[in-house]
Amino acid sequence: MLFHGEVAGIRDVVTFQARTAEDLRKAFEDSVDDYLDFCRNENVEPQKPFSGTLSLRTSPELHQRIAAAAARRSASINQWIVETLERQATADLDHGTTSVR
């Protein structure tokens, strides 16, 4: 019997394991410390979890269309974009889409 975990939200793979739940936190902390030491030794920036903030550039025409679509749903532009991206990301992941558009 073994508890196993992985740091989520980064592309690098940082795993940890322990035989007891009590030891799992220490194993996690040790793995993160090892990862940070590795990054320092290799002179690379450690990856950080996604912030949830995106910067988006588009044409003024598309910006206007997005604003109109959001207004039609009584939503903010941000809310409309988040909902639209969520639907599309879910559809792409559910259908195994691998191409980047």
Image (tube, rainbow, N blue to C red):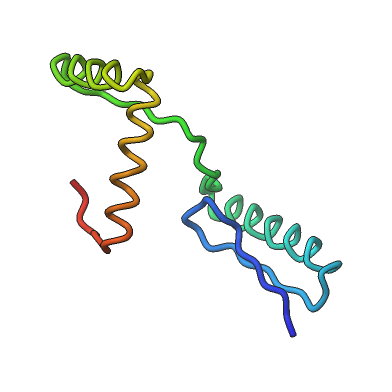
Furthest residue toward bottom: 1
Question: Image check: 32 left or right of 66?
Answer: right
- Please tell me which residue is depicted at 55% across the width and 47% down the height of the picture: 46
User: Which of the two residues, 87 or 57, is positioned nearer the viewer here?
Assistant: 87
User: Which of the two residues, 5 or 43, is positioned nearer the viewer here?
Assistant: 5
- Please tell me which residue is depicted at 40% across the width and 26% down the height of the picture: 79
Question: Image check: 1 left or right of 89?
Answer: right
Furthest residue toward front: 73
Question: Image check: 17 left or right of 94?
Answer: right
User: Which of the two residues, 64 or 24, is positioned nearer the viewer here?
Assistant: 64
Q: Position of residue 20 (x, y in %)?
A: 83, 74
From what the image shows, is residue 57 above or below residue 64? below
Furthest residue toward right: 22
- Please tell me which residue is depicted at 18% across the width and 46% down the height of the picture: 101
From what the image shows, is residue 97 above or below residue 63? below
Q: Position of residue 29 (x, y in %)?
A: 75, 57
- Please tell me which residue is depicted at 53% across the width and 51% down the height of the picture: 9
Query: How many numbered marks appear?
Result: 0
Residue 76: quadrant of the picture: top left
From what the image shows, is residue 2 above or below residue 80? below
Residue 16: quadrant of the picture: bottom right
Q: Position of residue 41 (x, y in %)?
A: 60, 55
Q: Position of residue 87 (x, y in %)?
A: 32, 44
Q: Quadrant of the N terminus?
A: bottom right
User: Which of the two residues, 42 or 26, is positioned nearer the viewer here?
Assistant: 26
Residue 33: quadrant of the picture: bottom right
